[in-house]
């Protein structure tokens, strides 16, 4: 097979439109044969449930009472959610979680990428080490960080006290610290993501731009401001959009770490949604909440895919 | 004076530059070491005895024991000293470890089964997602498909969906179809979650294979499908392997669906590890042992895949 390929290659440069001429009809059939199973699976397991969620959001259905009559309630669920102060509180918690993590991770990730880009000896090895947390199981990570955060026996409090004598730090149990507890773990996990994309951006800058700037006697700040920053901006945007979207729907790690507590200080939208849907079994109401969350994430996702296509070209 | 300063800035001598690089290296290595602390801590906790794991201050030097691993894999019951003495000598090393704490091993725990579920569901869904993804990627890459960009966007957009948003109807649907708490149901679900990634990644790999190869094969008398199987597939081998590992890691890490849709039969390890209970709270050495065993494969794969990571996390958009 390998031997026939190079020999036959010249013959392959036939007239334009070879692919269309080679029996168009069967090609179309083949194309659908290739693509249809994937589309069918996605329709069955993603789109159909999504439509069902939208339908349920207009009803008073409760999944734990299958016998009960399903009543159409119109926009009542949506009105209740948008009028609920609690829900706005969870939305605010989610928004501040997303903003805080994105700001910290962008600063750290960009900084690390700039440092790694100096290509010191062994930078490949250390980059790989930094990347590891990104791939780990969020729920399992959340669990073992509760151990690290133990106020008396945990190593986090111990290390902090080694540098500053603040006494036992109850990261998970205290209202003031719990939001930071989830921010720290998220930063530990996902800074590498932003770093990796920034690094890709930095590597895409042709060196002659800097050489030209040096001839023009640009200082380090000017080089950063007028060459580096604009060039990595699309990559950074991509990273922040994707991570922002993922954090809007953040669930696994925070459930295992704080499960929304203490009180509802770290109750993110997804966590509350799970409570309403699978603990209180308010199926109709929580479906409306799910639709609102979906629209938010989908809006961010559309921007993300546009950015993705731009970076690609 | 000013001129001197300028010339120093535009052509810095080697020494300050080397110093700056050294400082950069030091900062990056410091960050990497901080990153490693939680991971190392969880690893060493797996070899602590339960009292050592909750000592104050945290013990860095301790006598390593396999108690955590024994507790992870066994179910035990507390007995009186007299009863244990009446049993005669312990048959195995793990019996001996348990008896030291006045425990008798009553059988295996559920951890091995949960771990196997993770393996079965992970590999099953990965195989399906890569199979479907390869076909679809080939279709999108090589044929004129109407509304191609819209379809590709649709496929990717399914991945953006918050799991909780579709979990309710999937829960209802699976209840009706008898798929709740079955490995098959979870495999189908994870396939649907992963197929979008598989299509996008694999399409990138197919796009990189010159069309001339297949065209030549077709002129040599191969049918389109033969050309795909005999010419394109072998070229895609590395891409398929990378894609499969990504799918495997995502299926391995999934938690929300597993928590909501499985309880006994098909439960995977992520919802199980957090609830490994010892006497008086979580059995931390056992949790740490389970965590270590669960995360080790991912860390191995991440290191193997380090050069493909960028491609994987951007759905194939950035290829380096």
Image: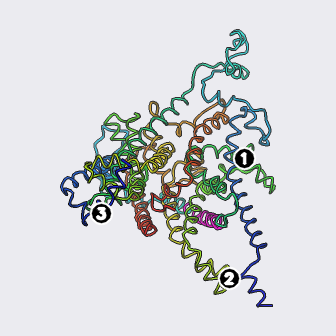
The vertical placement of B180 against B129, above or below, is above
Circle 2 — which element? loop
Relative to B192, A120 lies left or right: right
For residue A151, the mark is 1
Nearer the viewer's eye, disc 3 or disc 1? 3
Along the line of sight, the residue nearer the viewer: A94 or A306: A306
Relative to A140, B23 lies left or right: right
Q: CA distance from mark 2 to mark 3?
A: 52 Å
The quarter of the displayed image where residue A123 is located: bottom right
Q: Mark 2 or 3 closer to N-term? A: 3
Circle 1 — which element? loop
Percent position of residue B61, x then y: 80, 39
Along the line of sight, the residue nearer the viewer: B121 or A105: B121
Percent position of residue A227, x then y: 58, 78
Relative to A111, A30 lies left or right: left
* Picture quarter with the N terminus of chain B: bottom right
Chain under callout 3? A
Does residue A34 appear anywhere in the picture? Answer: yes
Nearer the viewer's eye, disc 2 or disc 3? 3
Q: In the rendered image, which residue does mark 3 sit on?
A: A13
Percent position of residue A136, x then y: 57, 47
Q: CA distance from mark 3 to mark 1?
A: 71 Å
């Amino acid at each position: 097979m390998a031997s026939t390929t190079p020999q036959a290659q010249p013959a392959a440069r036939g007239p334009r439109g070879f692919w269309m001429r080679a029996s168009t009809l069967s090609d179309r059939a083949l194309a659908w044969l290739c693509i249809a199973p994937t589309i069918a699976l996605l329709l069955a397991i993603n789109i159909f449930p999504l439509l069902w969620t939208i339908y349920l959001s207009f009803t008073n259905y409760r999944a734990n009472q299958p016998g009960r009559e399903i009543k159409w309630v119109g926009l009542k669920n949506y009105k209740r959610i948008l009028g609920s102060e609690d829900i706005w509180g969870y939305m605010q918690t989610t928004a501040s979680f997303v903003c805080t993590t994105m700001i910290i991770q962008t600063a750290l990730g960009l900084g690390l990428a700039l440092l790694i880009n100096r290509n010191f000896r062994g930078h490949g090895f250390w980059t790989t080490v930094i990347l590891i947390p990104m791939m780990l199981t969020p729920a399992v990570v959340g669990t073992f960080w509760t151990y690290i955060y133990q106020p008396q026996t945990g190593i986090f409090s111990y290390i902090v006290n080694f540098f500053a004598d603040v006494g036992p730090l109850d990261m998970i149990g205290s209202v003031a610290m719990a939001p930071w507890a989830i921010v720290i773990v998220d930063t530990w996990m996902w800074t590498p993501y932003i770093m990796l994309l920034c690094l890709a951006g930095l590597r895409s800058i042709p060196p002659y731009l800097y050489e030209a700037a040096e001839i023009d006697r640009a200082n380090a700040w000017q080089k950063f401001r007028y060459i580096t920053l604009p060039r990595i901006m699309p990559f950074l945007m991509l990273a922040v959009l994707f991570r922002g979207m993922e954090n809007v729907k953040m669930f696994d790690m925070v459930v295992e770490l704080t499960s929304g507590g203490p009180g509802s200080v770290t109750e993110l939208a997804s966590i509350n949604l799970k409570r309403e849907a699978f603990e209180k079994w308010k199926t109709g109401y929580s479906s409306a909440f799910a639709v609102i969350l979906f629209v938010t994430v989908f809006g961010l996702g559309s921007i993300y895919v546009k950015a993705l296509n731009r970076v690609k070209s | 004076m000013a001129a001197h300063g300028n010339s120093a800035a535009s052509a810095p001598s080697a020494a300050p530059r080397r110093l700056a690089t050294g400082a950069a290296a030091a900062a990056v290595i410091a960050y990497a070491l901080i990153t490693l602390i939680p991971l190392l801590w969880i690893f060493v906790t797996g070899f602590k005895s339960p009292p050592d794991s909750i000592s104050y201050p945290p013990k860095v030097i301790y006598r390593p024991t396999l108690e955590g691993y024994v507790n992870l894999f066994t179910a035990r019951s507390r007995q009186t000293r007299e009863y244990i003495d009446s049993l005669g000598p312990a048959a195995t090393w793990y019996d001996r470890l348990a008896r030291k704490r006045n425990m008798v091993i009553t059988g295996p725990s559920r951890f091995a089964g949960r771990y196997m579920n993770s393996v079965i569901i992970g590999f099953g869904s990965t195989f399906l997602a890569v199979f479907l993804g390869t076909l679809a990627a080939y279709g999108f890459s090589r044929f004129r498909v109407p509304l191609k960009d819209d379809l590709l966007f649709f496929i990717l957009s399914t991945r953006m969906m918050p799991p909780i948003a579709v979990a309710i109807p999937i829960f209802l649907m699976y209840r009706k179809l008898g798929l709740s708490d079955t490995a098959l149901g979870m495999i189908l679900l994870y396939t649907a979650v992963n197929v979008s990634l598989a299509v996008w990644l694999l399409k990138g790999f197919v796009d990189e294979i010159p069309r001339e190869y297949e065209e030549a094969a077709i002129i040599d008398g191969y049918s389109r499908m033969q050309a795909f199987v005999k010419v394109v597939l072998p070229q895609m081998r590395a891409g398929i392997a990378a894609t499969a590992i990504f799918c495997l890691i995502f299926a391995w890490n999934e938690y929300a669906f597993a928590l909501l849709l499985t309880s006994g039969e098909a439960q995977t390890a992520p919802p199980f590890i957090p609830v490994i209970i010892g006497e008086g709270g979580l059995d931390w050495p056992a949790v740490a042992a389970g965590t270590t065993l669960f995360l080790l494969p991912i860390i191995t794969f991440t290191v193997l895949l380090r050069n493909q990571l960028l491609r994987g996390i951007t759905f194939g958009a950035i290829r380096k």
